[in-house]
Amino acid sequence: MKRALFTATKTLWHLFPLSFRRSAPTLWLAKKTKGMLSKNVINEADLSPKIEEHPVTIVEPILMNESEVKSPLLATMTPGVRVISTLDELDEMLKMLDQAAAISDDELRRGFTQFQMQFPLDLPEDPDSDEYRATQMKLYQWLNGKAYTTANEVSAFDVAAAIKKPFPFQTESPQTVGNHIISIGHLIRTLNLKAKSSLLEFGPGWGNTTIWLARMGYAVTAVDIEQNFIDLINGRAKAKGLEVEAIQGDFSLIDSFDRQFDAVLFFECFHHCSNHQALIASLDRVVAPGGKVLFAAEPILDAFPIPWGLRLDGESLWAIRHQGWLELGFQETYFRSLMARHGWDINKVECAETPW
């Protein structure tokens, strides 16, 4: 009788929407009922053994068309995607990605879509607590093999070659180049800054946004943690006769500025911030009255199953284990609430022409 009741309850449970099953009240109820409704919850107190002891069902990988890849973030348990649960399986997938990368950048990106991990959902209730942050850092350490520091955010490449042919042009992929150019165009149009405005750009990376904004006459201050990127931006600016202030440093550098900017830009970089709450708290002091902050191509989605934490899609797992980078995602509801607590009005502007 008990077995039949449990089976019926479990069947009914999976008929509910995913957003309901992962809501805070539901997770609390599941915890109080000893996990009857969610048998794959991972205890943050002993993360690695729990993942090893409770492997999930593996689905054979399939290739996905470019048109099917709507976001760099894959929802948990995406149909047709292999779900892995051990480091051995992850390393197996990384070998597959190495083989794909040897063919082309497009093949590498298709490989990213073939696997993922489940999210640990048994998390501390307060997403702003040190305890919650510790669970994410512990998960990172398990995936990467060492504790996270900003020193892990390294990018080794030939600066001289990149001045002539930076990302995305080096991929030689019409899809990747096209999506990137469209994204930057949408970004500039959305910022809609007055001529001669000042702009603080964090994580400029290859400097594409930096150079284009500087060519428009904006006063751009670019901050990147990687010295190679700073050298690259300076080289690209010099080649075009542009003035750009490029500074090597991490996100905490925001507290050292004694001036304000008309806008602050995060383009594909905010999700690398290990203390995003502190960064957001510091924005007000560097943004001039009436100024703007833009979060562009960031994984801030209501489909994200936890308030914030490591993304566990194939590309993020590759970046964490292979590159050492921190790859966070944010639930849009949580992000909006956090920004509102610091007094920000929020507008969301989508671009249908690019999956980014």
Image (cartoon, grey):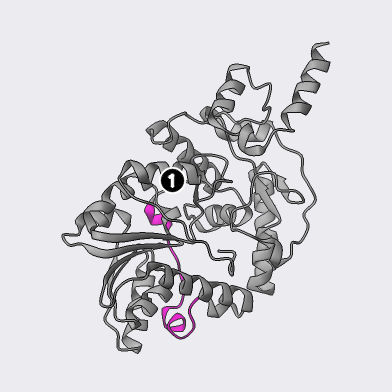
- Left or right relative to 322: residue 35: right
* Residue that appears at 72% across and 28% down: 13
- Left or right relative to 18: residue 239: left
Residue that carries the numbered disc 1 in the rendered image: 335
Q: Which portion, as a residue range, is magenta?
A: 150-167
48 vs 212: above or below: above
Q: Can residue 89 be seen in this view?
A: yes
Check the image and name the residue furthest to the top.
1
* Residue that appears at 67% across and 41% down: 85
* Residue that appears at 73% across and 51% down: 81
Q: Where is residue 46 in the image (x, y as percent from the top left)?
A: 55, 29
Q: Is 242 in front, or is 165?
A: 242
The amino acid beneath tag 1 is: Phe
* Residue 157 covered by magenta stretch: yes
Q: Position of residue 42 (x, y in %)?
A: 60, 31
195 vs 32: above or below: below
Circle 1 SS class: helix
State the quadrant of the C terminus: bottom right
Check the image and name the residue furthest to the left.
258
Q: Is 14 in front, or is 277?
A: 14
- Left or right relative to 8: residue 27: left
Q: Position of residue 17 (x, y in %)?
A: 67, 37
* Residue 264 covered by magenta stretch: no
- Left or right relative to 259: residue 198: right
10 Å crowding of disc 1: few (<14), some (14-19), many (20+) = some
